[in-house]
Image (cartoon, rainbow, N blue to C red):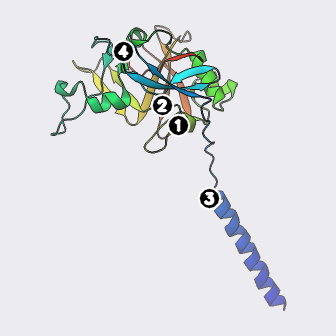
Amino acid sequence: MVRIAKLLLVCLLCCGVAATLTACSSDDDTPAKIPAEQKGIFTDPRDGLQYGYVTYAGLDWMTENYRYDINDDVNSSVYLDADESGITSEANYSSARNLQRYGRLYTLAGAKAACPDGWRLPSDEDWQRLETALGMSAGDAATDGWRGNIASSMLSVYDDHSDLNLLLGGYFFLHVGYFGSWRYMGTYGYYWTSTPDSSKEGEYYYVRKLSYAHSEVCRMSMEPTSYKLSVRYVRDAQ
């Protein structure tokens, strides 16, 4: 009887450990997506293109990267497609596929030039307001680097979509070779703010950086004339 009791005790302990391991392995630390308060459609009267928007914390945010053509190749670009040989070329500059999905990449000046009436390039404060509405603490929102755990409510990657639908459109760096360099499409997304970073010498502006491999959102700053980034516009909720 003693031996049987010991065996039963061992079995119970083993089952308890197994249950604990199973419970731990199934834990999901990813927070639930925060749904938009409302949704709508905006039509740019200059070219007739339409953009969805969603509302968070009293602000309307566009749900697509902007595509307006400012007719300025210095301050606006489309991520090049490879042709059938796998080589990118200027012949593919107006790539319908990348333009439709990822929009145009703009310098800060280009982003301001492309902005439609009634909308604005979001400030760093606007981004922080969005981030706190999606669950980031105010303290984290005001710090630099990767912070918060809210990317799931912001990013759309593969078949995993959010209402805000931020995309990983990469960036264009103007000073590598004669034609510059497109980088990181599908891996990172970079979005301008209108707010200068006064903590640095020279001219830098805050941006938001997101990655398919991070659950956090990065607050950092970049030179406004050296890079072309994706753009989302914002307005006070209608």
Mark 4 vs 3: CB contact within 8 A? no
Mark 1 vs 2: CB contact within 8 A? yes
Horizontal and vertical percent for residue 222?
Answer: 45, 17
Residue type at tag 2? Leu
The alpha-carbon separation of the residues under discs 4 and 1 comes to 30 Å
Q: Is residue 38 above or below residue 179?
A: below
The alpha-carbon separation of the residues under discs 4 and 3 comes to 45 Å
Q: Quadrant of residue 21?
A: bottom right
* Residue 143 makes an appearance in the image: no
Mark 1 vs 3: CB contact within 8 A? no
Image side of residue 132 versus residue 197, left or right: right
Residue type at tag 4? Ser
Image side of residue 152 versus residue 5, left or right: left
Residue type at tag 1? Ser
Q: Is residue 218 above or below residue 159?
A: above
Numbered-mark total: 4
Mark 4 vs 1: CB contact within 8 A? no
The numbered mark at residue 166 is 2
Q: Label 1 belongs to which residue?
A: 162
Sort mark 1 into few (<14), some (14-19) or many (20+) by Cα contacts within 10 Å. some
- The nearer-to-camera label among 1 and 3 is 1
The alpha-carbon separation of the residues under discs 1 and 2 comes to 8 Å
The numbered mark at residue 226 is 4
Q: Is residue 168 above or below residue 49?
A: below
Horizontal and vertical percent for residue 149?
Answer: 61, 36
- The nearer-to-camera label among 2 and 4 is 2
The numbered mark at residue 25 is 3
The alpha-carbon separation of the residues under discs 2 and 4 comes to 22 Å
Q: Secondary structure at mark 1?
A: loop
- The nearer-to-camera label among 4 and 1 is 1
